[in-house]
Amino acid sequence: MRPVIGITASVSDDRLSYMQKHAYARAIESAGGLPLILPPSFDVSLIDQTLSLLNGLLLAGGDDIDPALYGEARLPECGLVTPIRDVWELPLCRAALDRRMPVLGICRGVQVMNVALGGTLYQDLQSQRPTALHHAQQEPPEEVTHDVTLIPGSKLADVLGVPRLRVNSHHHQALKDLAPGLTAVSYALDGLIEGAEMPGHPFFLGVQWHPERLWEGTNAAHSRLFQAFVHACAPSDLS
Ligand code: MN
């Protein structure tokens, strides 16, 4: 039996369809998990039963988080928000943490982890924290465009097995103030946080890049992230 990994989904621009890029499910499947795409709901009373079906949670990429949820007024440069995802995913993340369920956050996902636990975001890097690094790359997502360093001794560094990694970058927002309980474990060379985790938790970890678009490439470190996540999700009576 494979561990069941829930993957958060988005909604189409016309709000009529649920959707998620297949790269997330393929990455989980290839690493030995059973992916299950979760439709978001405004009914958060469904969260406990949803989590009871799962062995792990993947918080996937998507639109910006409403700045009101981290106590800020919305700047003009803030992008599209998806209220149903914010309403669903923040308590979903906190409930998964309460269960000590393994959680992997990717791009928006690591931002959800931070905001859910009381952290804040840059609403727009270009206007609030301009650097020479382009975090919203024009190149296709299968191309790596900047380096990140990994903090030695962190779970992320142990899993990836390298001190430094080239990654893709499709974000115009990023973590600003870290939430209590989270530690920064990866940085871009401009000092921006690219990875965070919760020390002492079996697997509560997020990255700002998109490993689901890189795991089939030449650098095995990206697939090791999914393998370690799925492994952490395997209950002891499954193997
Ligand atoms: Mn980046």
Image (spheres, rainbow, N blue to C red):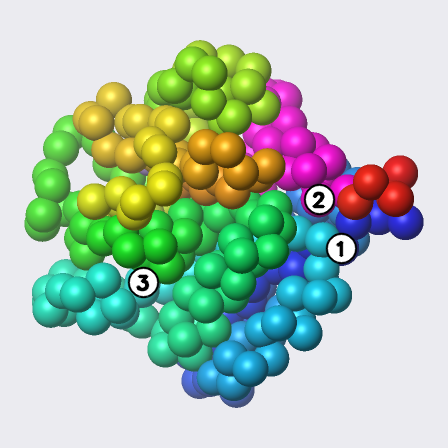
The kind of secondary structure element at disc 2 is helix
Q: Nearer the viewer, residue 20 or 138?
A: 20
Residue denoted by label 1: 4
Mark toward the viewer: 1 or 3: 1
User: In the rendered image, which quarter is residue 220 located in?
Assistant: top right
Report if residue 17 is visible in the image.
no
Mark number, residue 233: 2
The kind of secondary structure element at disc 1 is strand
> For the residue marked with disc 1, what is the amino acid?
Val
Question: Does mark 2's beta carbon lie closer than 8 Å to ligand 1?
Answer: no
Q: Are marks 1 and 3 in contact (CB under 8 Å)?
A: no
Magenta stretch bounds: 209-234
Category of crowding for the residue at label 2, using alpha-carbon neighbours closer than 10 angstroms: few (below 14), some (14–19), many (at least 20): many
What residue is at 60 percent from the left and 80 percent from the top? 46
Per the image, is 214 magenta? yes
Category of crowding for the residue at label 3, using alpha-carbon neighbours closer than 10 angstroms: few (below 14), some (14–19), many (at least 20): many
Image location of residue 232, percent across then percent down: 68, 38
Q: Are marks 2 and 3 in contact (CB under 8 Å)?
A: no
